[in-house]
Amino acid sequence: MAGTDGAPTTPPVDAAHAPAAAPAGGATFAGVPVRAMEDVMAARLEQIVTFGHTPERDREIPIYHHREFTANGRRSMMRQVEKQLASASEYAAYGHGKLDVTRRKLVKTAALILAAIDRIDAELENEPAPDVDEDDLPEL
């Protein structure tokens, strides 16, 4: 849909399909609360600024390793995501009393996922894609 000036317009949303209301005073983007996205981006920025986890530096960490730890004693990116998510799940099992900890752990996990995506993007930019036939890949 385009408005009279050619700019796209948002289609009308009925009450049954409207986004949930933002928390009191919370910012929204097209009616969708953005607090979680802001918190994840802030955590990702902290990873980069405070801890130096840039895509370039993260290239030292494998995306995946078949063992818990690599030869240099570090976890691969995917193992780190796995551990963070498991930790968040453990706190979630405690119920409402630990939801604040669960949320913090999920925010850090989401930021780590962004780091893994940045790491993969850096890898893809620096290496030509291998000629792989999708039919040869195992189904997950």
Image (cartoon, rainbow, N blue to C red):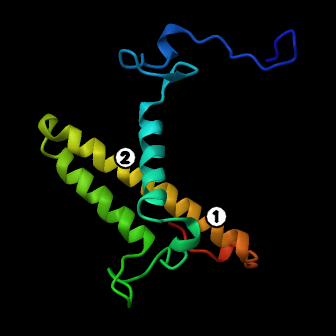
Mark 1: few, some, or many residues within 10 Å (few <14, many ≥20)? few
Give x and y (percent) for residue 39. 41, 40
Farthest residue, direction right: 5
In front of the other: 75 or 138: 75
Q: Secondary structure at mark 1?
A: helix
Give the residue type at disc 2: Val
Specify which label sits upstream in the sequence, 2 or 1. 2
Left or right of 133, for residue 2:
right
Mark 2: few, some, or many residues within 10 Å (few <14, many ≥20)? many
Left or right of 42, for residue 2:
right
**Which residue does the image show at 50% across and 73% down from the upper left?**
63
* Residue with the mark numbered 1: 121
Left or right of 100, for residue 36:
right
Query: How many marks are shown on the rendered structure?
Result: 2
- Which image quarter is the N terminus in? top right
Give x and y (percent) for residue 49. 47, 57
Answer above or below: position of 52 versus 40.
Answer: below
**Which residue does the image show at 51% across and 63% down from the upper left?**
116
**Which residue does the image show at 55% across and 75% down from the upper left?**
59
Q: Secondary structure at mark 2?
A: helix
In front of the other: 83 or 132: 83
Give x and y (percent) for residue 137. 61, 74
Farthest residue, direction front: 50
Which image quadrant for residue 100?
top left
* Residue with the mark numbered 2: 107
**Which residue does the image show at 68% across and 15% down from the upper left?**
11
Answer above or below: position of 102 versus 66.
Answer: above
Give the residue type at disc 1: Asp
Residue 132 numbered tag: none
Answer above or below: position of 129 versus 50.
Answer: below
